[in-house]
Amino acid sequence: MINIFEVNETNEMIEQENLDVRTITLGINLMDCIDSNLDKLNKKIYDKITTVARNLLQTGKEIEAEFGIPIVNKRISVTPIALIGGAACRRPEDFASIADTLDRAAHKVGVNFIGGYSALVSKGMTKADELLIRSIPIALARTERVCSSVNVGSSKTGINMDAVKLLGEIVKITAANTKDNDCMGCAKLVVFCNAPDDNPFMAGAFHGVTEADAIINVGVSGPGVVKHALSKVRGADFEVLCETIKKTAFKVTRVGQLVAQEASRRMDIPFGIIDLSLAPTPAVGDSVAEILEEIGLEKAGAPGTTAALALLNDQVKKGGVMASSYVGGLSGAFIPVSEDQGMIDAVNEGCLTLEKLEAMTCVCSVGLDMIAIPGDTSASTISGIIADEMAIGMVNQKTTAVRLIPAIGKKIGDTLEFGGLLGSAPIMPVNRFSCEAFVNRGGRIPAPIHSFKN
């Protein structure tokens, strides 16, 4: 039973500490839309999305009004489009027409993003997979709300280096195609290792083939809540610190659980998972970097940062799994540079480097996220950075991701401005030495020996 103290506590977290539900994401299976005729395929996709999601926006607004819980985003994820479009698409432009359809459907139902313009190629690429990947620069340049992801590796299959090489080139082309919009296309493109089927967070969300026909997933936030709680135990030992994070994560996740159950009931769609990730925003006081500083670091990136982030991630998960029977997605601490004011400040002050961020990704929720690099960075260097991050995920049996933004026409010290939740990104230096011969070898990096558990 919820008592009045808990109600008041939750109200305080919402009003003063930036607690919100980051997203309700409606996953939709498009397998029954498959058709060899491209026009019919696009019509089926549009009709299904606009039918299944017709009440999503209104349901979110009703829950916000009734419970007083801010729900920042309402989103949709769909079955990876490489699987849906293979029978009808013969060229990249054909796949891009499906992106146009997704964008129209997203506008129609009022969601801010639709994810699933995706391919799963950890062991090899089909012709459809390759066509979709090659269409990404076209699709992201002419759509507003479509997000794209490609899974190029896993702990079971290894890393598809042919796909990694290709995606280095695709990232460069996408940046060039959207250079007049601060290379925004790259902010909507994620490269994964071990991508989860049930991730509600953009840009990497897609509706997994193991999921039901439709599903409700919820992603919570709350870095400000955790920071506020830790400020009350400043100077205490690690046991007190850990207990405080766990208890706070429990409370945050319970809010998400309530929203998920209500959305599921009102839309008559099964509840999938709660993703209890600490997802920052550019707002002051809503920063994972500031949590690390509250733990005892002068700045994010200082010695001890990786240990502090590992502690934070583990305690968030321990607290969250007690609050919901179905926890999934990415679930941990996000460290996107552009979306976290504390991370931005640490980069600008020279405390946080690309190499330190890579070390932090060994223990965080995702990976190298929303990082702007000089526009003249080579495609092979981008592929090398992707390969490094995929290797961390493969060997550690965790999800890792890369969302790099080559800032065309800009250099170190300049800034990309995205606005909204995507924030702004200071352009960071990359290692100037080449990995081209390594990237050009082709083939697949084998999975580690500990993956052989059948």
Image: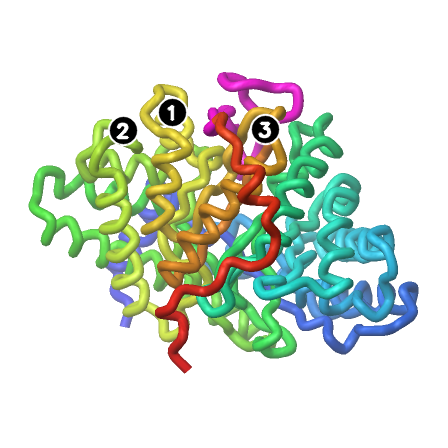
Q: CA distance from mark 2 to mark 1?
A: 9 Å
The amino acid on which the numbered mark 3 sits, given as a three-letter code, is Thr
User: x and y percent of residue 133 in the render?
Assistant: 71, 52
What scheme was used to colour the molecule?
rainbow
The amino acid on which the numbered mark 2 sits, given as a three-letter code, is Lys
Left or right of 233, for residue 252:
right
Q: Nearer the viewer's eye, disc 3 or disc 2?
A: 3
Secondary element type, mark 1? helix
| Crowdedness near tag 2: few (<14), some (14–19) or many (≥20) residues, C-alpha within 10 Å | many
Q: Residue at x 40, y 71 (%)?
A: 451
| 428 is within the stretch colored magenta | yes
Label 3–label 2 contact, CB within 8 A: no
Q: Residue at x 40, y 75 (%)?
A: 452
**Residue 299: image tag:** 2
Secondary element type, mark 3? loop
Left or right of 96, for residue 244:
left
Residue on which disc 3 sits? 377
Count of marks overlaid on the render: 3
Among the two numbered marks 1 and 3 on one chain, the one whose residue lies closer to the N terminus: 1
For the record, the magenta segment spans: 407-431
Q: Front-most of 237 and 88?
A: 88
Residue on which disc 1 sits? 345
